[in-house]
Image (cartoon, helix red, strand yellow):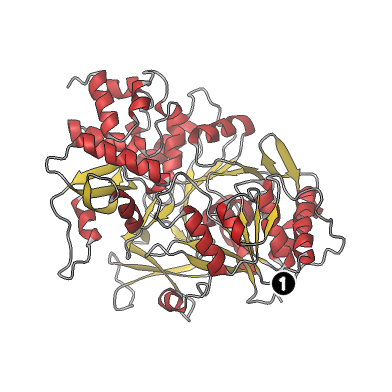
């Protein structure tokens, strides 16, 4: 599977992350430091499962901190 | 006569280690001697204002030294401090929270005084106000020379907490003096070892506010009662700020909830040194095995899980890391007993599902002015019906959910109808229902929505989630919107939320 950054951004918006936050995301900075909060994170995992059918495991989800981390996981 | 709980906590520790920091806050500290003095200052003001013993005194304060001093000062005087809920985000107009909730609590408790650092807040206009600084009493408050603490009878109240009811109307849970001392006598040794001053060498941080039962138990009932240094965090829910505090102040004990442990892991810099942490305690909901493992790998500290409630104040179930399986509730805290009963009130057989009952020290014996709910929940023989559905098999207890509609998420209770009321105000929502869903083993909220227009898509779902976030406290926000054509109801039209849970 190949997921582009644009697709990932759309998933973030569908997960309820503010569009302005998504537009300003730096790929290698932790999402938690860029306005993606404790409600957004589980919503992103749910949106990934709904949109891409990918269920991210309990422990590996703890390692997904940045946009780059998500891209690597979804494209592996 | 019982001992005055505040006098027991303050006098014992101020005599033992007067100069030891009791509280760390921002860049400063308050020693045990200073905290004792500040608490007596609050007690003296209550005396001068003719606040009668057993009168209710509301506290509207963030996590700060003034909260601790005012709380303990009120208890010294024999008044009953009633912490108001700390705000945790925007609230829906019309929903039962924030200012409305505070007004309800002030009236229901019959509070005679409000101690606050924000005298301009709306509910302060309806009650006598004692303003203070976050650091403690104002300098012009009198210093009490007569330090004779109120001598409580066994049934005299020490403090009262409010908990959400299944209809959204909060219930007052009054506790007696002995209840405040129960965590240190029972739970403390179970977590930290049997030494008499088992916490005196620790620096304790809680991400749960003092106005919540768990945060109050951790920081005053265990931390200060055990002679620890308590690191007060003014914004305990903000993971980024908590990480900065972990880095700068090096606590040795961390009390938190699974969602915050998870958020901290994702916020921490890989180079952050967490070797000072020797003990972590989690409550609010079961911590998934993967999160347990990731946290221990990252910090080296195992997580002890505990379960309690506003009614019990003391956590009555505790796991032993390495012995109990992740996701189970552990064993009763020494002094407590639990049972699982079926609808016939008889104990269920091994492996059966039923309601969890608990009996032990420090449990509230009545709700405030709610004889109806008291009769349902607090039994004359001492057993408390927690309303939690559990399964017990081979000595291991598992939490399965609630016997009412309330949902526990992020360590806090959510009444679904309050969230639904907010979502229905979104112009694209015709009808909705909120139920629990599991994401990575943690409970969150899912909104099942009938849209006004057909062909609702994921973009509208995202818009509804943002709408909720702009109007509700964080723990009340859904993480998923599922569009449905109808909602399950009984023949009389009552919403059946439990059927939605099974769909997710």
The chain ID associated with circle 1 is B
B233 on left or right of A65? right
State which quadrant residue A73 falls in: top left
Q: Quadrant of residue A54?
A: top left
Q: Residues within 10 Å of mark 1 (few under 14, many from 20)?
A: some
- State the residue in front, B190 or B498: B498
Who is closer to the viewer here, B259 or B211?
B211
Where in the figure is residue B386, as x and y percent of width and height?
41, 67
Height in image: B186 above or below B18? below
Which residue occupies 52% across, 70% down?
B360
Question: Looking at the image, can residue B196 be seen?
Answer: no
Indicate the position of residue B239 as horizontal and vertical percent values.
49, 36
Give the residue drawn at x 51%, y 22%.
Answer: B271
Point out residue B393 in the picture as x, y percentages from the top left corner: 32, 62
Question: Looking at this view, is B175 or B466 the one in front?
Answer: B466
- B373 sits left or right of B31 in the view: left
**Residue sticking out furthest to the right:** B145
Dot 1: element: loop
The residue labelled by disc 1 is B52
Task: Report which quarter residue B161 is drawn in.
Answer: bottom right
């Amino acid at each position: 599977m190949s997921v582009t950054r644009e697709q990932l951004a759309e998933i973030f918006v569908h997960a309820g992350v503010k569009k302005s936050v998504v537009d300003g995301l730096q790929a290698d900075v932790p999402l938690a430091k860029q306005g993606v909060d404790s409600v957004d994170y589980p919503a992103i995992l749910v949106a990934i499962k709904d949109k891409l059918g990918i269920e991210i495991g309990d422990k590996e989800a703890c390692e997904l901190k940045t946009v780059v981390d998500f891209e690597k996981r979804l494209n592996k | 006569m019982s001992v005055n709980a505040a006098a027991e906590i303050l006098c014992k520790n101020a005599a033992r280690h007067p100069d030891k920091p009791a509280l760390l806050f921002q860049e400063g500290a308050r020693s045990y001697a200073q905290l004792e003095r500040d608490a007596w200052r609050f007690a003296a003001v209550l005396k001068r204002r003719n606040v009668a013993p057993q009168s209710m005194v509301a506290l509207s304060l963030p996590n700060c030294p003034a909260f601790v001093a005012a709380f303990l000062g009120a208890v010294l005087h024999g008044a009953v401090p009633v912490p108001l809920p700390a705000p945790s985000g925007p609230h829906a107009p019309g929903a039962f929270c924030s200012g409305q909730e505070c007004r309800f609590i002030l009236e229901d408790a019959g509070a005679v005084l409000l101690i606050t650092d924000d005298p301009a807040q709306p509910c302060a206009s309806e009650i006598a106000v004692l303003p203070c600084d976050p650091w403690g009493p104002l300098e012009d408050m009198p210093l009490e020379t007569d330090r004779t603490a109120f001598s409580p009878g066994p049934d005299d109240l020490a403090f009262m907490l409010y908990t959400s009811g299944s209809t959204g109307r909060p219930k007052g849970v009054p506790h007696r003096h002995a209840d405040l001392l129960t965590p240190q006598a029972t739970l403390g040794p179970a977590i930290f070892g049997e030494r008499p001053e088992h916490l005196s060498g620790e620096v304790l941080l809680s991400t749960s506010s003092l106005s919540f039962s768990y945060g109050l138990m951790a920081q005053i009932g265990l931390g200060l009662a055990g002679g620890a240094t308590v690191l007060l965090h003014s914004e305990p829910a903000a993971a980024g700020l908590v990480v900065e505090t972990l880095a700068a102040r090096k606590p040795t004990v961390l009390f938190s909830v699974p969602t915050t442990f998870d958020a901290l892991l994702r916020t921490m810099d890989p180079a952050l040194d967490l070797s000072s942490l020797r003990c972590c305690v989690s409550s609010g909901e079961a911590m998934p095995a993967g999160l347990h493992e990731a946290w221990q790998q990252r910090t080296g500290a195992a997580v002890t899980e505990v379960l309690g409630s506003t009614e019990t104040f003391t956590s009555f179930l505790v796991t032993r890391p390495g012995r109990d399986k992740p996701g189970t509730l552990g064993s009763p805290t020494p002094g407590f007993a639990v049972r699982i009963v079926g609808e016939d009130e008889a104990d269920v057989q091994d492996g059966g599902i039923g309601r969890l009952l608990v009996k032990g020290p420090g449990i509230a014996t009545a709700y405030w002015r709610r004889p109806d709910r008291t009769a349902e929940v607090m039994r004359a023989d001492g057993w408390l019906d927690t309303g939690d559905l559990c399964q017990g098999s081979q000595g291991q207890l598992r939490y399965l959910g609630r016997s009412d509609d309330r949902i526990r998420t992020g360590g806090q209770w959510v009444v679904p109808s309050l969230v639904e009321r907010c979502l229905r105000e979104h112009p694209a929502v015709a009808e909705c229902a909120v139920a629990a869903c599991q994401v990575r083993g943690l409970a969150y909220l899912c909104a099942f929505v009938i849209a006004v227009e057909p062909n609702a898509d994921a973009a509208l779902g995202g818009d509804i989630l943002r709408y909720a976030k702009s109007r509700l406290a964080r723990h009340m926000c859904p993480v998923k919107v599922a569009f449905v054509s109808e909602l399950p109801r009984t023949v009389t039209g009552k919403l059946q939320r439990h059927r939605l849970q099974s769909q997710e």
